[in-house]
Image (cartoon, rainbow, N blue to C red):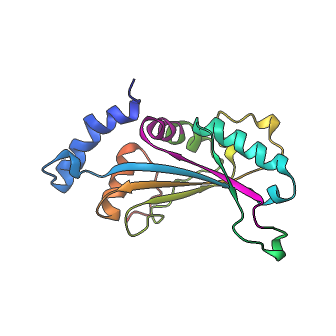
């Protein structure tokens, strides 16, 4: 079964983008290539339980098992040795990408305290969008009572587009709540 947002993309968003930017073919429209979730767990070098908790949380959020990231080199000031686990990441593609995006936009973002919208300035020059979350407990999959340490997460949306404006319009049509500071 195709995800709800993927059908919405095909039936509503592609025609709207084609009308606005004058695409002759639906394949010219911007589209998601992947979404990468990254969680840095600095205290994981001291205690492996924090890394295991972060992996379990991210697996619940993403619906797929994350990869544990390890330190590439030793840093004495942070008490990190080469090879110690310092975080985890997961790459979402296809149906899981749209299912995560649906839960993120419609369930997680409204649960952020004092939320006024996401920044429209977080695009890079190729049109990819990055957002940082201070607490993963905004996701309904996380049981707040079992959280030992408040953990943050980075979400990088890799969008195949020609410009920032096309990517911005794509996210806007998906329902990303940008702040009023428009471009």
- Pick out the residue farthest to the top: 1
Does 163 appear above or below 99?
A: below
Query: Is 62 positioned to the left or the right of 129 in the image?
Result: right
Q: Position of residue 183 (x, y in %)?
A: 37, 66
Is 64 a magenta residue?
no
Q: How many marks?
A: 0
Up the image or down, 180 lies above or below 137; here it is below
Identify the residue shown where x is 32% and y is 62%.
165
Q: Which residues are magenta?
A: 82-103
Residue at image coords 32%, 39%: 9
Q: Where is residue 78 shown, x and y percent of the image?
A: 82, 71
Using the rendered image of the protein, determine whether residue 149 is visible from the camera's viewpoint.
no
Query: Vertical placement of 113 versus 129: above or below?
Result: above
Q: Is 56 in front, or is 174?
A: 56
Q: Position of residue 100 (x, y in %)?
A: 51, 39
- Residue extending furthest front? 83
- Residue 171, image x, y percentages: 39, 50
Q: Quadrant of residue 160?
A: bottom left
Residue 162 position by quadrant:
bottom left
Q: Is residue 90 found inside the magenta-colored segment of the image? A: yes
Q: Residue at x 39, y 50 (%)?
A: 33
Residue 57 horizontal side relative to residue 110, left or right:
right
Query: In the rendered view, would you say 65 is above or below 24?
Result: above
Classify the position of the N terminus by image quarter. Answer: top left
Q: Is residue 111 left or right of residue 159?
A: right
* Residue 1 shows up from this direction: yes
């Amino acid at each position: 079964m195709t995800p709800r947002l993927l059908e919405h993309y095909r039936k509503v968003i592609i025609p709207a983008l084609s009308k606005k930017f004058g695409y002759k073919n639906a394949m010219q429209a911007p589209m998601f290539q992947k979404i990468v979730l990254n969680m840095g767990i600095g205290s994981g070098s001291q205690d492996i339980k924090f890394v295991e908790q972060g992996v379990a949380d991210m697996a619940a959020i993403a619906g797929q098992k994350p990869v544990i990231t390890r330190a590439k080199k030793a840093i004495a000031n942070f008490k990190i040795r080469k090879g110690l686990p310092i975080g985890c990441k997961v790459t979402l593609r296809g149906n899981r990408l749209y299912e995560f995006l649906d839960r993120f936009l419609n369930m997680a973002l409204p649960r952020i305290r004092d939320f006024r919208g996401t920044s429209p300035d977080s695009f890079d020059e190729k049109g990819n969008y990055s957002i940082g979350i201070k607490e993963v407990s905004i996701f309904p999959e996380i049981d707040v009572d079992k959280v030992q340490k408040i953990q943050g997460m980075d979400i990088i949306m890799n969008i195949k587009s020609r410009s920032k404006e096309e990517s911005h319009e794509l996210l806007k049509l998906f329902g990303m709540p940008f702040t009023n500071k428009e471009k």
